[in-house]
């Protein structure tokens, strides 16, 4: 049996660099929350839809910040989750993905200003799927996009309206967003964005 | 998962995964646009060698809601009646490019044969084979029970099993593939199953099944039951005298009005009455019981579409070049932990 020099499987992570820590994420979200309010000229008709998994906790955080800036807003009433699994264009090229629940705010999305929220904007294909999923659920007046990280390498004509941080990356690198709602490192809660360079 | 052939070798993780996925599929049924593009361009063949309405329509609705193309094949009026073999039929379908075959056959084991041979390179879903198994029926029954059970407990049904639920299955167990599939699946999900039937309608070897056996329906009810499932008396398979008269059967093993009232006097206010359909009203279930608020008959039909959507999605959506797994990170682990997943197709290459 001969040894294979680069066996397929998870590539080895050779370098990890933290690009946003907890305070950086918090500051970016505070700014995005105010940008959303500014672009919408207030909180009227706002609906924040997070894309699972990490878009949803970000949406919840943003809703809390919007509620803090505008006391008339009930944070829980404007936030929801939009699952895009069934609308992806790579379903037959990926291992089976289990769908996540889609939960809309009680007011629905018809004639609302829907802000889609995701952690990383990369090829734009997730957002393409999200737009399709959204159309099947109703007809929003305006759809905007807010992301924590925009790392470039778009494959579709899609751009974000609100960006936490523009992060020029090589496509060989991996951007990992870790949030305490979804991730932990050795059992401890973690809030950070790291770039992993792989060999 | 490559095929869905039986519930006997379905692991707890996979069973819960199908039920959880069905939970999301059920939400689609309540939307304005009841369609998902997940299986666009895939072809599902309904291969029915035995009569069926609800199962075939349910599979057809499920496939269509996922945007798959559906081809219906009924043995009656096809080349099968000219003597074509299962092998030739399968190879014909393979040549037409079927991605999944939903098969109902009067011979126990026909779906296994289709899955184990290289006649056709498609996912095989057992929609009932002889007196062997009917896995999607058992899954939709479990789904109905799980919704009821977690509603009682006030917990979300996603991820839950049926630990502690007492289920009685009464009627023609001998001929019932539904009973067999349910016994295996409910055991896996942690429910306590009691089979109630006249001794003539119990199969040989039932004492080795992971369930209790009773000959007295009233006694079983008195011990407390959370879900009462009545099985259809299969007239077409009654080729011997299994019970003296239908009237005696209905009195002793049917769920009649007296037993419906007994549920209230016994204090079993949350017990549901289930039936896989089609019902013989007045024989194994009275009209009052079938139409009572306890009856889940229509909910079962509704949930059937969700379960079949989940099964089709999980079998067809993954990377067809590799064994499908839950999450990439745990791919190796889940592969090792679920040896009962059927990978026969991939491994044969």
Image: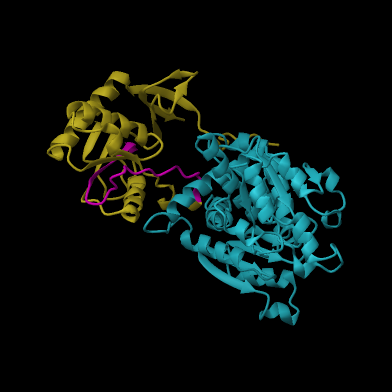
Chain colours: A yellow, B cyan
Q: How many marks?
A: 0
Residue at image point 37% right, 22% down? A191
Residue B260 is situated, as x and y percent measured from the top left of the image, at 65, 51
Look at the picture and state if B33 lies above or below A198: below
Q: In screen coordinates, is B281 left or right of A77?
A: right
Residue at image point 82% right, 57% down? B201
Determine if the magenta segment contains residue A118. yes
Most common SS among magenta residues: loop
Q: In this picture, which residue range is highlighted in magenta?
A: A93-121
Residue A54 is situated, as x and y percent measured from the top left of the image, at 38, 34
Q: In screen coordinates, is A37 left or right of B67?
A: left
Residue at image point 73% right, 60% down? B117
Within the image, what quadrant is residue B238 found in?
A: bottom right
Residue B87 is situated, as x and y percent measured from the top left of the image, at 73, 69
In this orientation, does residue A55 appear? yes
In this orientation, does residue A89 appear? no
Q: In screen coordinates, is B51 left or right of A125?
A: right
Residue B132 is situated, as x and y percent measured from the top left of the image, at 76, 57
Given residues B174 and B273, the one toward you in this image is B273
Determine if the magenta segment contains residue B186. no
Look at the picture and state if B11 lies above or below A157: above
Within the image, what quadrant is residue B73 found in?
A: bottom right
Look at the picture and state if A165 lies above or below B230: above
Given residues B109 and A174, the one toward you in this image is B109
Given residues B197 and B113, the one toward you in this image is B197
Residue at image point 71% right, 72% down? B88
Given residues A132 and A19, the one toward you in this image is A132
């Amino acid at each position: 049996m001969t040894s294979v020099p680069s066996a397929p499987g998870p590539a080895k992570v050779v370098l990890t660099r933290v690009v946003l820590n907890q305070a950086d994420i918090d500051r970016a979200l505070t700014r995005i929350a105010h940008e959303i309010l500014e672009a919408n000229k207030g909180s009227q008709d706002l609906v924040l839809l997070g894309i699972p998994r990490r878009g949803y906790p970000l949406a919840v955080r943003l809703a809390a910040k919007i509620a803090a800036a505008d006391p008339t807003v009930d944070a829980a009433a404007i936030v929801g989750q939009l699952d895009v699994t069934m609308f992806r264009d790579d379903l037959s090229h990926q291992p089976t993905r289990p769908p996540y629940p889609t939960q809309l705010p009680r007011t629905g999305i018809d004639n609302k200003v829907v802000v889609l929220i995701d952690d990383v904007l990369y090829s734009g294909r997730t957002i393409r799927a999200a737009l399709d999923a959204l159309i099947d659920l109703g007809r929003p007046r305006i759809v905007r996009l807010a992301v924590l990280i925009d790392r470039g390498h778009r494959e579709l004509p899609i751009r974000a309206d609100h960006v936490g941080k523009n992060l020029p990356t090589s496509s060989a690198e991996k951007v990992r967003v870790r949030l305490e709602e979804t991730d932990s490192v050795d059992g401890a809660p973690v809030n950070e964005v790291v770039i992993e360079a792989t060999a | 998962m490559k095929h869905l052939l039986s519930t006997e070798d379905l692991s707890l993780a996979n069973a819960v995964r199908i039920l959880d996925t069905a939970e999301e599929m059920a939400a689609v049924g309540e939307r304005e646009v009841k369609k998902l593009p997940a299986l666009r361009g895939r072809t599902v063949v309904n291969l029915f060698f035995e009569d069926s309405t609800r199962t075939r329509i349910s599979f057809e609705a499920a496939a269509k809601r996922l945007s798959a193309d559906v081809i219906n094949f009924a043995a009656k009026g096809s080349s099968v009646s000219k003597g074509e073999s299962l092998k030739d039929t399968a190879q014909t379908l393979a040549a037409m490019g079927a991605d999944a075959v939903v098969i109902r056959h009067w011979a126990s084991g026909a779906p296994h044969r289709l899955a184990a041979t290289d006649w056709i390179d498609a996912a095989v879903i057992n929609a009932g084979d002889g007196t062997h198994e009917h896995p999607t029926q058992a899954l939709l029954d479990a789904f109905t029970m799980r919704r009821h059970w977690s509603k009682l407990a006030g917990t979300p049904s996603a991820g839950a099993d049926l630990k502690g639920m007492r289920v009685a299955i009464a009627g023609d167990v001998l001929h019932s593939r539904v009973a067999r599939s349910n016994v295996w699946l409910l055991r896996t999900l942690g429910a306590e199953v009691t089979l109630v039937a006249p001794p003539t309608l119990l199969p040989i070897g039932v004492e080795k099944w992971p369930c209790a056996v009773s000959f007295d329906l009233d006694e079983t009810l008195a011990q407390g039951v959370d879900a009462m499932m009545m099985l259809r008396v299969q007239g077409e398979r009654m080729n011997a005298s299994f019970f003296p008269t239908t009237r005696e059967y209905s009195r002793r093993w049917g769920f009649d009005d007296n037993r419906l009232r007994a549920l209230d006097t016994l204090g079993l206010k949350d017990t549901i009455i289930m039936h896989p359909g089609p019902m013989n009203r007045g024989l194994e279930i009275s009209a009052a019981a079938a139409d009572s608020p306890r009856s889940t008959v229509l909910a079962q039909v509704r949930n059937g579409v969700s379960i079949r959507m989940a099964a089709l999605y999980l079998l067809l959506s993954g990377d067809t070049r590799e064994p499908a797994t839950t999450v990439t990170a745990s791919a190796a682990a889940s592969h090792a932990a679920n040896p009962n997943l059927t990978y026969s197709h991939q491994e044969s290459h």
